[in-house]
Image: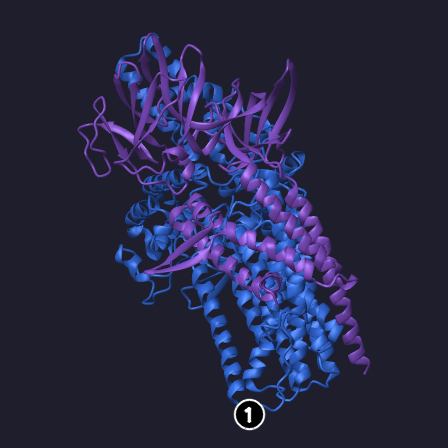
Amino acid sequence: MKKSVAQVLGIALAAALTVTSSAWASPKEPQSAGKWDDATLDAFRTLPIQEGGRVKPFDTYATFLLLRLNGKRTFTQDLENGQKIKLDAMEWLLDCMFYPETAINYRHFIVDNADYITGLGAHAPSSGQRERFSYADLMPAIPQLFERARAAFQLEQNDRTVQQQMIIALAQAVQEFESVTHYYDFARDPFDASKSSLAQRIFPGDAATGLTLSKVLVEGRQLRLASAALEQLKQEGNSEENVTRESAAFGEFLNPLLIAAQTGAGLALIPPADKARLEWFSAGSLARETFNVETLDAHDLALLAALEKLPTVVNEKLQFKAAVNDFHTLAVAAAQARGEYNKIPLEVSFYKAKFFSYAQVLFILSFLVAALSWLNMRSRVLGWLTATLVTMPLALLVTGIVYRCIIRSRPPISTLYETILFITATAVLVALFIEVVNRRRIALSVGAFLGTLGMFLANRYEITNAQDTMPVLVAVLDTNFWLATHVTIINVGYAAGMLAAGIAHVYVLSRVLGFKRDDREFHRSLTRMVYGVTCFGLLFAFIGTVLGGIWANYSWGRFWGWDPKENGAALICLAMLATLHARMGGYIRDMGIHLAAIATGCVVAFSWWGVNLLGVGLHSYGFTNGIWTATYIFWGTQAFMIALGFFVLARDRFAPKTAAPSKPSRGEPAPVETLVAK
Amino acid sequence: MTILKKLYALLSSYGLAVVLFILMFFLILFGTFHQIDYGLFSAQNNYFSSAFVIHKLGPIGIPLPGGYTLMALFAVTIVAGMLRIRRTWERAGLLLAHFGVLVMIISSAITFHFSDRGHMRLYPEQQSNEYSSYHDWNIEVGKPAAGATLHLIPDTLFKDLSSDESREFFSNELPFEISVSGYAPNGVPVRENITIEGTNARVVDGFRLLTLPEEKEAEINVPAVYVTVTDKTSGEKTEGILWGMDREPLTVKSGDVFYTVGLDRKRFPVPFTVYLDKFTADFHPGTSMASTFESHITKKENGGEEKINIYMNHPLRDRGYTFFQASYGPPNAGPNDTLYTVFEVVRNPADQGPLVACIIVGIGLLLHFTQKLLGYMRAESRRRVA
């Protein structure tokens, strides 16, 4: 992995230096953004592309590419007249592919340390630290940028500084941008047979005019025999000098093919007619393939012909629309013939529906209404409104999860991103269940808050990670049975741990602020909820953990390998067990249970996020800068809450005792509900 | 109250259970952090399987009971608690859950004491009826003509030696004694003119032993050791350096008989032969991520043959032995290179213990918490009616 990316960086640098200036020196009038009609955009959105080991909509590819570069799902460009124009990912990508001379001025490279980049020679767009650069801004700095990125790449991931990580990310973003902007270089530079007699032999007469890559590749066999043809020239009495000149002329003729092989390698948009071939073709890989097989498949070449026509007619609106339609029809038919298209429209509609964005908005709204309802607890309208507003985003969230399950043909969780969605949905669902049982609006409000927090986290993770959230899985995860059992169950345990911690916050804050000071039943109901949710969490965390061990025993031959993720799950079980046994033994009372629940929430965060970042073990994903910071901030806030709890305990201890709750006897189980004063 | 009753009361108390949970919590937490710098094998030996450990937190040493001690105490506490708890229907779930945990602890103990684990590496058309340990090594003494090992000196008998200590080994069946010294858990013989830090002063046949830092992944370590073979009759000495990666063992002559002395991984026999017909690795298209890798083997035994495919999540199980598709190699192999397969081979008499325990605990907890939930719902319903 390390070598291959470094090599790719090297190739990209070489490509950038050799091709950039010449390929875009086209006299075409630069086009401004946002001039794609809806039908064209829809056709491109539903176009299948193979990337990252799976077939996905072109729209998904565009969205995550833009996220990686720009840190946002849309791109806003300042126009010279002072206006702004906003492009969605597909419009932006089409601009990059078809109008690279325009796109190089798009300020879409988000950089956290702008000074460092300007120090390498880049033009500063303005004076801020977090700035967006255009490719044109970066161009003077690109050689140094790649050199430093290569050096940083040689280091172990955990040894890289934040700056080095930024450099690598920016170099990769530049490389990806170059990959799409140069994709059509092969179609922009036509083949010129006029200077090579050998080329004219292969493409006699009219065939030599308007030669495109697909037409040249039809004669792949002749191209391969070119060296023999040169030898024949010698035998026909041509001088050594003439043969050398012809050899050079023929090499020049083939140059666009070499460019295609190099720069056209990025987008695998051509589903091979040969179903045994798993890897789709890009223009470049098809060009390379001509040297490996006797003849290329006519269907593949027809697709290439349709693909290469697009940039040549891009300024002719009607012709372009027809050409896009032709290519779309051919590509979809080819993908369908391979059985690889049926989930594409569903995925497009999934992203178009924006389930999670709407869910986030509604959760925020529900939390605000819940807060309002606390001001008037007797208002049934506000109560029902809150319940409805929590149920609606939950329904959206669950619908989105179901969509993803259908698209992936997988259970709800197989990636870290999906754990956020699932845990959020489960926590809100359990909160709703508690609300149905006790109708106190506490669980409802906590559910609204956790829903808001969870969706915010999911959104931030998607943006920060900026990678396809439906990736292919490593071999050991290719088992729906264990994903559906172990992974799902243990995440229910995580959700319960976070919900219990959430409710415990309400208790601690209400005690600190003196909220419902005289309503002892209110506080005890909170304790009962936390106790119950902890029991629920233990059931799932324990069963999930043991099932993980059984899966490991089944796959690797050991039940327990002390992997950090396994240890994290065990820590959650131990924290919950210690809480429940301490409660049963009477060692902790109301506040003790709540503080233990908050501490358990910290343990859940460690197991959920922290252990992945330790850099050891089978579950070490080594991803996403900033996660440690966020985790530390979370732990810091929780430590503060625990300190507040101790403050309340100390305050109660030294305050005049009026009605302290009776202490349960030690050594005898004392379930919380039996302690409630009726 | 007699001392025994006090002890019983202590062992069956919630207080001890809570203390054990907390100790176990910190043991696992510290052991996990220990892995970052020292690797899993070290964490297992020093924390999770040990009787006692002192965790270094900066300059402060925190003493903790090791995993073995804690698991034993848990077992005792659970038994005492189950004897003490009132055996009513309300507590049936709790009893069942605790019994399940006890089953799990017992099966863990059986696994710890009686299981073997190792690996078998095969190229296509190779076969084997034994697997090699990941961490344990033996000095093997044999006769080349006989083709079999005569005597073994397990590394547990000499790995405690410091670089300037030696230990003698002898057998009445062998005409010589072997002195072992300068053991390096991860080492390599280097030419005598190399004297960087870590090289031993002793030179044998122009080589000296360089001790390398131990790897975090302990299975990568290759040990090396000096041996001096002294003929019992003639007193003649033969010196050598044994290294785990040596292709050829040290040859010793006693009288007219040749013997070999070598250092090799501990090997375990299996009651059948595994022949690798073919190994295939498929990748997600356009990526270097394996989607599946699969070994097509023939299991040979007593003249009979059986064709079996082993792949991820589909191991071969036979008479207590389990073959898992663990990995493949060589690393950085090209598209046309022949790949070898690596099986993880495990013999574990308590293989299914955790599954049984999980089912028992699951039923127990489900029963108990359902009772609690129904009680809570009834109480809330009464409250709302009131």
Q: Residue furthest front?
A: B2
Depth order, front residue of A149/A499:
A499
- Location of the C terminus of chain A by quadrant is bottom right
Depth order, front residue of B116/B191:
B116
- Location of the N terminus of chain A by quadrant is top left
Chain letter behind tag 1: A
Give amino acid for label 1. Pro
- Left or right relative to B167: residue A566: right
In which quadrant of the rendered view does residue A343 lie? top right
Depth order, front residue of A420/B350:
B350
In which quadrant of the rendered view does residue A324 lie? top right
Q: Residue furthest right?
A: B385
Tint applied to chain A in the drawing: blue
In which quadrant of the rendered view does residue A597 lie? bottom right
- Left or right relative to B11: residue B120: left
Image position, residue A562 (x, y; %): 51, 48
Q: Is residue B331 visible?
A: yes
Tint applied to chain B in the drawing: purple
Q: Secondary structure at mark 1?
A: loop
Q: Residue at x 65, y 48 (%)?
A: B103
Image position, residue B312 (x, y; %): 59, 35
Q: Residue at x 44, y 60 (%)?
A: A628
Q: Which residue is mark 1?
A: A656
